[in-house]
Amino acid sequence: MNWLSTIIRPRIRSIVNEQKDVPDNLWSKCPKCDGMLFHKELKASKNVCYHCNFHMTITVKQRLELLFDDAKYEKIALPKVPHDPLKFKHRKKYVDQLKDAQSKTGEREALVIGKGTIGGQNTVVAAFNFAFIGGSMGTAVGEGIVRAAQEAVQTKSALIVIPASGGARMQEGMLSLMQMPRTIIAADMVKEQGLPYIVLLTNPTTGGVSASFAMVGDIHIAEPGATVGFAGRRVIEETVRETLPDDFQTAEYLLDHGMVDMVVERTKLHHEIAKLLCLLMSPTTDTKKLKGSGYGDQSKDAKGKNSTSTPKTKGTKASVRKASDLAKEPANKSADTQKNAPKSAKTSQ
Ligand SMILES: [Zn+2]
């Protein structure tokens, strides 16, 4: 069969001149290992290099389809905000830059909000589009995150934010920086209702975005190899005058240093997030039931663990364990301190 496919078929093709019909973009190259990637296989692997596991960028549409059950979701429109409030102009007018980005991406802004279910749990996802002026956060993006949080609260849904951003949008000056506290408040709105707030850190998450809502998730998930940090590597090296480790500011480095809870491969994201949401929200997000278990009653539990960074399932489990352990504890403690005989006697009682 080999000679048929390797010799005969190409010859026939050359005769019939079929090669002209073969598109040039059948293959692409991995930016990390230079491996050749067949586009169909690359599509199947969700834009992850199957030679070296490098996670390439995917479009926001692909990202949302990847996460939601059956790739189905409803898009939520971004609130309207004044364009170019500062009448900013550098090499190009900011208004023109916005128009170019809009025609290039087909989106109004650098954020897309979708609503649907993940693992059967109601979820609102706000995903950044890096192709839109570097996924920078201006007034529209900030307003979008507030809108996504409001939607999550109103529909008792989990909120997942997926940053892919160079930081604040400098063309909007101070107004872009004001989105940092605003988005933190938006995240708090969700947490105060006892709803999960998950951040999926993708490549890159830097600047004002990493310094605001992206670092206050109940759970931080990152894609392998994603760059996550505030200032760039060069700036830090020049400031501290030290050579930084090669894997500095990568998802794996942050996992080792406690900034990230999980590093999850793209193909497993849906499954892992679904599992988390089921743990955090099932059997229901009925706050009456959840309040009794310590879940969603963060303001009252504020004396205990920091509710902003502790996954709520841990809180629930801990509170359940505490109750049962407290009953057993005196018996166990006394058993441990005394001889074996009373221990077995007590346990048998
Ligand atoms: Zn590769």
Image (cartoon, rainbow, N blue to C red):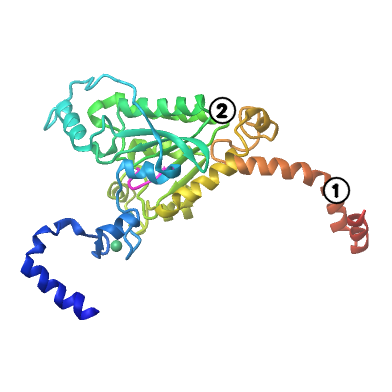
The residue located at (17%, 29%) in the rendering is 99
Tell which tag, 2 or 1, sits nearer the viewer: 2
The circle on residue 112 is none
Q: Is residue 282 visible?
A: yes
On the image, numbered disc 1 is attached to which residue?
A: 330
x and y, in percent, of residue 92 in the image: 12, 31
The circle on residue 193 is 2
Q: Residue type at mark 2: give it.
A: Gln
x and y, in percent, of residue 157 in the image: 51, 32
Q: Is residue 146 magenta?
A: no
Apparent side of residue 348 relative to residue 225 in the rendered image (left or right): right
Q: Is residue 261 visible?
A: no
Apparent side of residue 218 relative to residue 282 in the rendered image (left or right): left
Q: Quadrant of the N terminus?
A: bottom left
What secondary structure is found at the residue carrying circle 2? Answer: loop
Q: Is residue 203 magenta?
A: yes
Q: Nearer the viewer, residue 12 or 264?
A: 12
Q: Which residues are magenta?
A: 200-205
The residue located at (84%, 58%) in the rendering is 336
Q: Quadrant of ligand 1?
A: bottom left
Q: Residue type at mark 1: give it.
A: Pro
Mark 1: give few (<14), some (14-19) or many (20+) Cα within 10 Å. few
x and y, in percent, of residue 131 in the image: 24, 41
- State the predominant SS element of the stretch in magenta: loop
Q: Nearer the viewer, residue 272 or 302?
A: 272
